[in-house]
Image: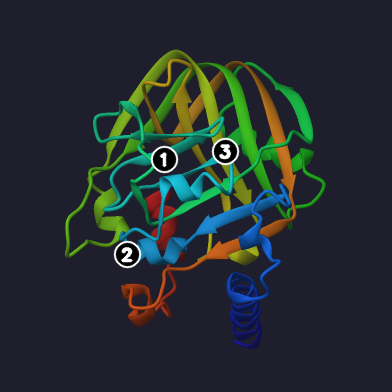
């Protein structure tokens, strides 16, 4: 019980520190988002999505001020987001990708400015589960954040997307139970995503959270599984984390986040 409470206290201290940065001195990160490119900028929390909080926190245009690479979703949980080379794409319920307008709302996202710190080839036949082991052996530590980009050809790629929701919003697990799964064979494209350390579970998705988009930028989704044909992996070591929470008057302020969402998050990610 002591350890569990200590973890909760540590997380509260982390969130308080990050939120303080939002409203602190005028020379902070919010005034100059390009000041430090080694920062993972996150909008809201994964636990907020678990509770069905899908209202917009920031627009796509404002989000792109904080990074040129990332993933997330859109207002109403309307599909999967991919940010690549400074452009934002929406993979909708039909599996097709569309360039998204700057005015679109975003309830949850992770973005950064991608700067390569590591580059390596991935062996043919490598699966998603095997990649996790490979990356784990490559990382200098599991206690910071990493942006992961993999470019190549995949003999198999399996993704999903979900339909946009209307209020009253259902919880995330109810939406993903009705997800649509897409299978691609011998497809070229890019994997975009992040590794987040275990201690931020509930704030972010602990472990690996990856999305995919084809070279033609016309299809993709949240990754469920894949097998590599030939690919190159790039990793950006990211040792700073900046959290933007929903503002005053939002449903976030009145939501009880005391339940343990770990099993639900795992279910929703699969």
Lower position in the chain sequence, tag 2 or tag 3 = 2
> Could one spot residue 232 in this view of the protein?
yes
Quadrant where the N terminus sits is bottom right
Q: Quadrant of residue 235?
A: top right
Extreme-bottom residue of the structure: 2
Marker count (numbered): 3
Q: Position of residue 206 (x, y in %)?
A: 57, 56
Q: Characterize the local packing of mark 1: few (<14), some (14-19) or many (20 or more) Cα atoms within 10 angstroms.
A: many
Which residue was labeled with disc 2? 53
C-alpha span from label 1 to label 3: 11 Å
Q: Earlier in the sequence, mark 1 or mark 2?
A: 2
Q: Tell me what residue is drawn at x 73 percent, y 55 percent.
A: 144
State which mark lies toward you, 2 or 3.
3
Q: Is residue 165 left or right of residue 6?
A: left
Residue shown at 30% from the left, 26% from the top: 96
Judged from the image, the secondary structure of the residue bearing numbered disc 1 is strand
Q: Residues within 10 Å of mark 3 (few under 14, many from 20)?
A: many
146, above or below 32, in the image: above
Whether residues under marks 2 and 3 lie with C-beta atoms below 8 angstroms apart, the answer is no
**Nearer the N terminus, badge 1 or badge 3?**
3
Q: Residue furthest top?
A: 186
Task: Identify the disc placed on residue 81.
Answer: 1
Tell me what residue is drawn at x 53 percent, y 50 percent: 110
Q: Position of residue 117 (x, y in %)?
A: 79, 36
Residue on which disc 3 sits: 69
For mark 3, give the secondary structure: strand
Q: Nearer the viewer, residue 52 or 60?
A: 60
């Amino acid at each position: 019980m002591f350890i569990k409470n200590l973890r909760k206290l540590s997380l509260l201290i982390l969130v308080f520190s990050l939120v303080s940065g939002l409203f602190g001195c005028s020379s902070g990160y919010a005034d100059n988002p390009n000041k430090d490119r080694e920062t993972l900028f996150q909008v809201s929390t994964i636990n907020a999505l678990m509770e069905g909080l899908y209202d917009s926190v920031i627009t796509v245009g404002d989000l792109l001020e904080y990074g040129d690479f990332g993933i997330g979703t859109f207002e109403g949980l309307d599909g999967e987001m991919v940010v690549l080379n400074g452009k934002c794409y929406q993979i909708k319920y039909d599996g097709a990708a569309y360039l998204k307008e700057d005015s679109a709302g975003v309830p949850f996202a992770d973005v950064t400015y991608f700067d390569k710190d590591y580059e390596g080839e991935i062996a043919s036949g490598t699966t998603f589960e095997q990649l996790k082991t490979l990356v784990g052996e490559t990382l200098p530590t599991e206690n910071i954040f990493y942006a992961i980009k993999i470019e190549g050809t995949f003999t198999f790629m399996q993704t999903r997307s979900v339909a946009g929701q209307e209020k009253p919003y259902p919880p995330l697990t109810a939406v993903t139970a009705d997800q649509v799964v897409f299978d691609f064979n011998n497809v070229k494209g890019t994997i975009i995503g992040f590794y987040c350390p275990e201690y931020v579970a509930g704030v972010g998705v602990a472990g690996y959270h990856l999305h995919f988009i084809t070279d033609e930028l016309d299809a993709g989704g949240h990754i469920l599984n894949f097998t590599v044909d030939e690919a190159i992996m790039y990793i950006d070591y990211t040792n700073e984390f900046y959290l933007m929470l929903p503002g005053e008057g939002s449903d976030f302020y009145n939501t009880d986040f005391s339940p343990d969402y770990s099993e639900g998050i795992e279910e929703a990610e699969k």
